[in-house]
Image (cartoon, grey):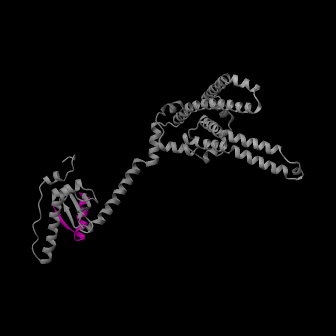
Amino acid sequence: MSNEDAQERTEAPTAKKLEDAKKKGQVPRSVDLGAAAVTLAATGALMLFGADAARSLMEMLASSLSVRGDDLVHDDIMLRSLGVSSGLALLGMMPLLAATLVAALASPALIGGWNFSTEALAFKPERLDPIKGFGRMFSMRSLVELCKSLAKFALIAGIAVLVIRSQLGEVRALATQPLAPAIIESGRIALYALLAMSAGLAIIAALDAPFQVWQHTKELRMSMQEIREEMKESEGSPETRSRIRSMQQTLAKRRMLQDVPQADVVITNPTHFAVALRYDEKRDFAPVVLAKGSDEVAARIREVAREHGVTLVSAPPLARALFRYVDIGRQVPHTLFVAVAQVLTYVWHIKVARRRGEAPPVPPSFDDSIEHVAAPSGAAP
């Protein structure tokens, strides 16, 4: 990658870029966060269950050193003694082991989440390239990691020195104490030192975890060209999207025209617009728009309606209002109830007149104000 390309990568990585990186095993990780979590968990477990663990270990030691003479004649005495000692040791150390295991599993979830990638385990010959290996060893990133390691060592060492100096009198006093109190006191001092160093590791982790997230995001930055290429790959080229939209519109028109024979009336402009309405008292609270269209689509709706004997009614203002403000599959708004009811009544009268052989009734008429009445609040007239 050239410097020019790197300088162009100023955009945050997209969700797809992050997901692809995760599949390759590239997720933010903080070794210091895991170390701090495990150390703090172990320290907490020792503070809570250290006394019980010490008693279990003492029982193990006593059991191991107290073998009766009669048992020495058995061949399996050593195996049985080892089994008993191992059970006591495991029982005593169980809280500590459980706490550290939970901490080790939970710490990755705090940054980057759990991730298993087979691509990260795949063999890559370039990893064996000695030139690239030396390049990684003496890269700027390696120098930064070295400085971080030295700073962490200095911090932990400084904490250890402060703890030793603060407990120096207690450490010297151990030589004058009986064995049992001296052991308890040395355990307290060791636990205090471990707690102080764990706090130091926690400080390091609090600084390192955000840095690792920032560095991971920086490495995955994208240029505008890469974002455009990704959008093309995920959504297709503009020509492909245009063809898909055209096909979708064709299918939608085809489904819409299939519903025209179910209509009770088609209201026309009479040439520019056509809206097919259905009203079934058993399932419709109000008339429903089954199909609508303009120009060529309107002509096709009128043609299908004539083929299936659906009545056509010329009402230009009402046709324009329905076409403009009511979507396909939606009920007509209450502001048009009266007008649509007049049309449906007119259609019913036509059917009655045909059965009786009478002259057709006079169709209803509507003025242009009906469009303003049908317009929802805030819509332009």
- Which quarter of the picture shows residue 219? top right
Where residue 78 appears, as percent x and y from the top left, is: 84, 49
Q: Is residue 241 above or below residue 270?
A: above
Q: Residue at x 66, y 29 (%)?
A: 193
The quadrant holding residue 58 is top right
Please name the residue shown 72% across and 46% down the image: 90
Of 103 and 258, nearer the camera is: 103
* 198 w.r.t. 27: above or below: above
Taking the magenta stretch, the answer to whether it contains residue 300 is yes
User: Is residue 270 shown to the viewer in this render?
Assistant: no
Residue 170 shows up from this direction? yes
Q: Residue at x 51, y 36 (%)?
A: 217
Q: Quadrant of the N terminus?
A: top right
> Left or right: 157 with respect to 264?
right
Q: Left or right of 2: which side holds 92?
A: right
Report if residue 315 lies within the magenta region: no
Residue at the bottom extreme, as displayed:
356
Q: Nearer the viewer, residue 228 or 62?
A: 62
Residue 149 placement (x, y as % from top left):
64, 28
The x and y percentages for residue 163 are: 65, 25
Please report the bounds of the magenta region as a residue range. Answer: 294-314
